[in-house]
Image (cartoon, grey):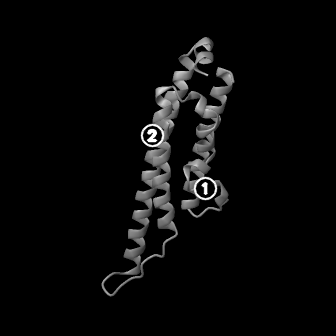
């Protein structure tokens, strides 16, 4: 694998994560999204697949190791959101209106999505850091790395 190919794979993985995030946001808004595009385990995502296969060749680089923590965090936060979305909403009680219950549920849903977005932004930042490390390397340095 050449440095150019490694960069292309990394950028494809990064783009796929951004698309995954967009699909999650669409799903949250009630848009039709093929749920097969929304794996709940990080190793099942396109990014995770790249990271644990072709990306392993970059495992000696410092920012590569940081990516793992960010990737796991994104999917921990996403699973929290997923569980919430698929839970049964509480019904209004004697002292609480349905409108208030719905409002609270909407606020909680948004908070969980914000957590996913924050973790995703950290993943993208670390991926960009890895991309920059690769671009600064000479072809000879890259060849020694692999």
Q: Residue lying at the far left in this picture: please name it.
A: 95
Residue 4 as seen in the image, left or right of residue 62: right
Any part of residue 79 in sight: yes
- Mark 1, residue position: 38
Is 28 located above or below residue 142 in the figure? below
Give the residue at x 50% y 44%.
71
Q: Nearer the viewer, residue 45 or 61?
A: 61
Q: Earlier in the sequence, mark 2 or mark 1?
A: 1
Quadrant of the image occupied by residue 51: top right
Task: Locate the N terminus and report the quarter of the image it occupies.
Answer: top right
Give the side of residue 56 with respect to residue 73, left or right.
right
Task: List the residue tagged with mark 2.
Answer: 122
Asked if the residue under mark 1 is in contact with the one under mark 2, i.e. CB atoms within 8 Å, the reply is no
Residue 98 x, y percent position in the rendering: 41, 80
Badge number at residue 73: none
Q: Position of residue 53 (x, y in %)?
A: 63, 38
Neighbourhood count class around disc 1 (C-alpha, 10 Å): few under 14, some 14–19, many 20 upward: some
Q: Which of the two residues, 111 or 42, is positioned nearer the viewer here?
A: 42
Of 65 and 87, which appears nearest the observer?
Answer: 65
* Callout 1 secondary element: loop
Secondary element at image label 2: helix
């Amino acid at each position: 694998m050449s440095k150019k190919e490694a960069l292309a794979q990394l950028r494809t993985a990064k783009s796929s994560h951004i698309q995954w995030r967009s699909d999650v946001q669409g799903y949250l808004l009630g848009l039709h999204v093929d749920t097969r595009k929304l794996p709940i385990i990080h190793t099942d995502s396109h990014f995770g697949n790249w990271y644990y296969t072709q990306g392993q060749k970059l495992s000696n680089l410092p920012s590569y190791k940081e990516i793992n923590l960010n990737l796991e965090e994104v999917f921990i936060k996403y699973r929290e959101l997923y569980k919430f979305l698929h839970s049964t909403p509480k019904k209004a009680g004697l002292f609480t209106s349905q409108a208030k219950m719905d409002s609270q549920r909407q606020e909680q849903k948004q908070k969980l999505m914000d957590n996913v977005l924050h973790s995703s932004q950290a993943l993208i930042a670390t991926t960009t850091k890895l991309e920059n490390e690769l671009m600064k390397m000479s072809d000879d340095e890259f060849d020694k790395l692999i």
